[in-house]
Image: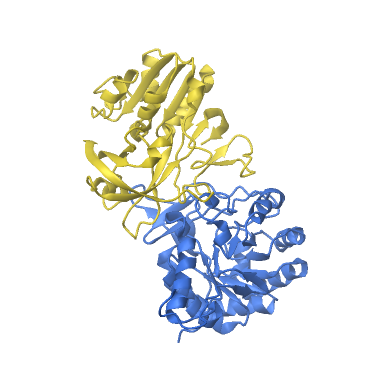
């Protein structure tokens, strides 16, 4: 028996993002979770609202030379460079793997040109993926990728192009390396995006003073982890004020409190990334913790909390 | 299925065994699973340092449920410095054992050389303890006369030493020790800095010797998901579908002819 529980407060963790119902508002950030196979040993994938896969391109990509990662204060930096096995192997192996679990599948798509993205999106149209997340914000790719994510016109254009081919709802993943995140959110909404996810990593750099060399082979990398959380919260708040489409908020979430904060800022769902590296079961704790917070504060649904901060 | 987790373990002992080199025994059920050449992801308590430190297993004591790591403190205010300050009874969080380990079965009935250089020396100990073969030669390369783990090596094989300063054994590196002592072998198992491994890869190719190398690279997740710690492979890897292998998951031990680094 639950003493102190308000009558009829059966908490419902379900959220609907662009018409797709997730059992709870928690997914994982692309690139931090592979396509689920490695983490399946540590985490019950059935308990995730959705699994967002590593970015996949039309052909296999080798990624950047190593070192690809470095630790930073309260975070890390990566320049993996979108290494991926290509869409064919992904469809043959990774989608069937995830279909074994009762979780939504969000396929992250990357590319070097509009044609690349469209080719992958078209290929995925007949696959049992639930949603697509278009990565136009990865700062590590030298050609194409970075241009889309930092120019509103290009972002709107790529959104329109992808929407022509996509069967599944399209989430545009925004880069924080911009002057106005609200402007970028509006641009992709105008292009027809069904949802936005933000933030991707912030471009950073680290120099080893003993060797007097850049720590990453790529020189720059994307900074992630708790250190960027306040920036992510602020940007989610700004994006939420700018668009009507659903928002998946991410950036340094490592606890249920961080996730609730993101939701109060305006996120309809949250994504957990870097925290998986130092606490592989963190997503489970976050799902449970969100439910606890809702019970303790009398919230029946997640949408009741979305954007509540003032 | 989802039965692996980050484990909270107890430190049993901590000892400084050479300048900047520490030996720590930890109590852990993972000792039952540990194979030579595998490593542990060890986490600091310092919230500003999030990533695990991957440290090779030096010894695994199945009977008493404990494992030993021997590691170098890499600098002031580093994670390894924090580990070196832990005492008996202190708690620690780890994930492990990780990685593939050395293929012990490749030594059965053969003459083998087990070789480690610098901070690659510690994992050679468990390898030496578990290797069953026709002839077991251990070649350990040090910087100077602080030949840590020497006694343990001598108890587990025929030991040859090289030191960079020439104070003990052959002056130079492990390959110098191998050449100067005219050591012949069928299989080499090696761990150490990249220049040493490159030299051994060439030497093995030259002599047509089967050779296994334990590689290292900056890691993040340690479990094969993030693709940070790759090495180039000769052929396309069946998992990644490109010429890259994950050192934490497909390795750290690779056949020398399979990898380029």
B220, above or below A30, in the image: above
Q: Position of residue A302 (x, y in %)?
A: 53, 77
Q: Going 65% across and 54% down the picture, which residue do you hit?
A: A100
Q: Going 59% across and 56% down the picture, which residue do you hit?
A: A54
Q: Position of residue B71 (x, y in %)?
A: 31, 39
Residue B217 left/right relative to A149: left
Residue in front for this viewpoint, A158 or A295: A295
Colour-to-chain, yellow = B
B255, above or below B16, in the image: above
Residue in front for this viewpoint, A78 or B64: B64
Name the quadrant containing residue A105.
bottom right
Which residue occupies the extreme front position in the image?
A: A1
Q: Position of residue A89 (x, y in %)?
A: 69, 48
Name the quadrant containing residue B19.
top left
The colour one sees for chain A in the rendered image is: blue
Residue in front for this viewpoint, B136 or A51: A51
Residue B261 left/right relative to A70: right
Q: Position of residue A163 (x, y in %)?
A: 73, 70
**Residue B175 shows up from this direction:** yes
Q: Going 41% across and 39% down the picture, which residue do you hit?
A: B39
């Amino acid at each position: 028996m639950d003493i102190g529980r308000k009558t009829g407060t059966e908490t419902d963790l379900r959220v609907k993002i662009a018409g797709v119902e997730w059992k709870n508002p928690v997914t994982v950030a692309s690139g931090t979770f592979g396509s689920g196979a490695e983490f399946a040993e540590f985490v019950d994938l059935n308990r995730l609202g959705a699994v967002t896969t590593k970015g996949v391109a039309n052909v296999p990509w080798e990624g950047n030379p190593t070192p690809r990662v470095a630790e930073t204060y309260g975070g890390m930096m990566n320049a993996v460079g979108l290494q991926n096995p290509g869409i064919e192997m992904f469809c043959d192996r990774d989608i069937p793997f995830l279909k074994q679990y009762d979780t939504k599948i969000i396929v992250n798509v990357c590319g070097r040109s509009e044609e690349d993205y469209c080719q992958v999106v078209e290929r995925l149209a007949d696959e049992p993926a639930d949603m697509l997340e278009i990565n136009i914000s990865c700062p590590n790719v030298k050609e194409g990728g970075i241009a889309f994510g930092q120019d509103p016109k290009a972002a709107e254009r790529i959104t329109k192009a992808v929407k022509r081919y996509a069967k599944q709802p399209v989430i545009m993943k925004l880069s924080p390396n911009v002057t106005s995140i609200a402007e970028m959110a509006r641009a992709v909404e105008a292009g027809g995006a069904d949802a936005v996810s933000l933030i991707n990593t912030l471009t950073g750099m680290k120099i080893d003073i003993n060797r007097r060399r850049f720590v990453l082979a790529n020189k720059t990398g994307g900074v992630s982890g708790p250190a960027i959380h306040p920036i992510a919260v602020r940007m989610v708040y700004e994006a939420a004020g700018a668009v009507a489409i659903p928002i998946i908020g991410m950036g340094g979430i490592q606890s249920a409190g961080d996730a609730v904060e993101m939701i109060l800022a305006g996120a309809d769902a949250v994504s957990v990334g870097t925290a998986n590296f130092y606490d592989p079961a963190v997503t489970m704790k976050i799902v449970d913790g969100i439910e606890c917070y809702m019970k303790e504060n009398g919230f029946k649904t997640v949408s009741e909390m979305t954007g509540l901060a003032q | 299925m989802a039965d692996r987790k980050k484990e909270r373990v107890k430190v049993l002992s901590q000892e400084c065994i050479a300048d900047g080199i520490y030996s720590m025994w930890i109590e852990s059920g993972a000792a039952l699973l540990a194979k030579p050449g595998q490593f542990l992801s060890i986490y600091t308590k310092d919230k500003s340092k999030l990533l695990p430190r991957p440290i090779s297993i030096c010894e695994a004591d199945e009977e008493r449920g404990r494992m030993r790591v021997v590691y170098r403190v890499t600098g002031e205010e580093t994670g390894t410095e924090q580990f070196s300050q832990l005492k008996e009874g202190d708690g620690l969080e780890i994930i492990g054992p990780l990685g593939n380990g050395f293929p012990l079965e490749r030594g059965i009935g053969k003459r083998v050389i087990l070789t480690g250089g610098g901070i690659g020396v510690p994992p050679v100990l468990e390898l030496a303890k578990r290797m069953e073969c026709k002839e077991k030669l251990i070649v350990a390369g040090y910087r100077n006369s602080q030949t840590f783990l020497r006694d343990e090596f001598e108890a587990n094989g025929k030991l040859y030493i090289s030191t960079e300063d020439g104070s003990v054994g052959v002056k130079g590196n492990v390959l110098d020790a191998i050449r100067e002592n005219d050591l012949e072998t069928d299989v080499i198992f090696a761990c150490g800095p990249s220049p040493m491994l490159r030299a051994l890869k060439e030497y093995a190719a030259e002599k047509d010797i089967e050779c296994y190398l334990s590689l290292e690279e900056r890691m993040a997740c340690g479990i094969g998901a993030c693709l940070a710690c790759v090495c180039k492979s000769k052929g396309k890897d069946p998992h990644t579908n490109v010429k890259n292998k994950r050192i934490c998951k497909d390795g750290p031990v690779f056949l020398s002819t399979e990898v380029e680094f």
